[in-house]
Image (tube, grey):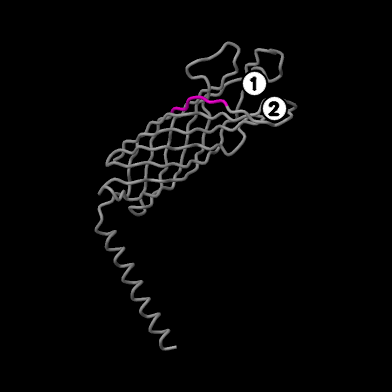
């Protein structure tokens, strides 16, 4: 029993010394609690859907262009962990550079509200540069929708109706390399829910919107 008490006392002293050392290191460090981030990104839109009235439920994917511009405010709990909330404007089009006559192309504009938990890891090869990995959720509100254009059958009941819902939620994994005032990274939106607007008595399949973008940020 006496040996156990001695061991517990030693562990308590070591733990207290370790906590004090961490507190002293954090108190003398120069990391900022708040960090402003202005960023721009561009990449591939992945428009994942099945055709209206498709009984086989097989999905297709149309590729397009995704472009976004945004601001994020990062709050650092420690030098390693932070939480960033923000606001972004995003435009997505399946035929950004070439549109065919009679094609039912998608073109949407969103306001995004991302919240991302980030981990910042020191680059062992340099003194100040860091790697960042993160995971977040994004709420997206559609500010510019588009309508079905069914050229082959103008009498189709879906023709002229609005395509997608007003909002949806995405999972956002991300990674980046941080150099002083700049961050170079990649982030993806993975759509979590069916965004197709539903109409009573009509079947218009399911749609999920995802993307992957290269992102450059200026931070201070």
Q: Where is 185 relative to 53, above or below?
A: below
Between residues 152 and 141, which one lies in front from this camera angle?
Answer: 152
Mark 1 Cα shell of 10 Å, populated few (<14), some (14-19), many (≥20): few
Q: Position of residue 25 (x, y in %)?
A: 27, 61
**Position of residue 219 in the picture relative to residue 196 (left or right):** left
The Cα–Cα distance between marks 2 and 1, rounded to whole angstroms, is 9 Å
Q: Secondary structure at mark 1?
A: loop
Earlier in the chain: of badge 2 and badge 1, it is 1
Do the residues under discs 2 and 1 have CB atoms within 8 angstroms? yes
Examine the image and state in which quarter residue 57 appears.
top right
Q: Where is 30 relative to 190, above or below?
A: below
Write the residue at 34% across / 54% down. Answer: 78
Q: Main secondary structure of the magenta part?
A: strand
Q: Position of residue 60 (x, y in %)?
A: 62, 28
Residue 65 part of the magenta-drawn span: yes
Between residues 189 and 20, which one lies in front from this camera angle?
Answer: 189
Mark 2 Cα shell of 10 Å, populated few (<14), some (14-19), many (≥20): few
Examine the image and state in which quarter residue 134 appears.
top left
Label of residue 161 in the image: 1
Write the residue at 32% across / 46% down. Answer: 130
Write the residue at 50% across / 26% down. Answer: 92
Q: Where is 186 relative to 202, above or below?
A: below
Q: Which residues are magenta?
A: 62-67
Label of residue 199 in the image: 2
State the quadrant of the N terminus. Answer: bottom left
**Position of residue 171 in the picture relative to residue 205 (left or right):** left
Between residues 63 and 21, which one lies in front from this camera angle?
Answer: 63
Examine the image and state in which quarter residue 187 appears.
top left
């Amino acid at each position: 029993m006496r040996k156990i008490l001695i061991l517990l006392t030693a562990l308590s002293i070591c733990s207290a010394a370790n906590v004090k050392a961490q507190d002293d290191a954090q108190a003398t460090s120069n990391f900022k609690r708040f960090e402003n981030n202005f960023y721009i990104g561009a990449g591939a839109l992945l428009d994942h859907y099945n055709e209206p009235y498709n009984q086989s439920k097989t999905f297709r994917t149309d590729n397009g262009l995704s472009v976004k511009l945004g601001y994020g405010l990062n709050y650092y709990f420690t030098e390693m962990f932070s939480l960033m909330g923000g606001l972004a404007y995003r435009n997505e089009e399946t035929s950004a550079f070439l549109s065919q006559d009679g094609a039912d192309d998608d073109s949407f504009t969103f306001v995004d509200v991302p919240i991302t938990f980030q981990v910042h890891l020191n680059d062992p090869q340099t003194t100040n540069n860091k790697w960042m990995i993160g995971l977040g959720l994004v709420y997206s509100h559609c500010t510019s929708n588009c309508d079905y254009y069914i050229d082959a059958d103008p009498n189709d009941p879906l023709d002229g109706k609005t395509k997608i819902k007003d909002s949806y939620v995405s999972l956002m994994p991300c990674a980046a390399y941080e150099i002083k005032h700049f961050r170079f990274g990649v982030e993806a939106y993975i759509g979590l829910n069916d965004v197709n607007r539903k109409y009573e008595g009509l079947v218009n399949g399911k749609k999920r919107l995802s993307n992957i973008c290269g992102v450059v940020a200026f931070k201070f």
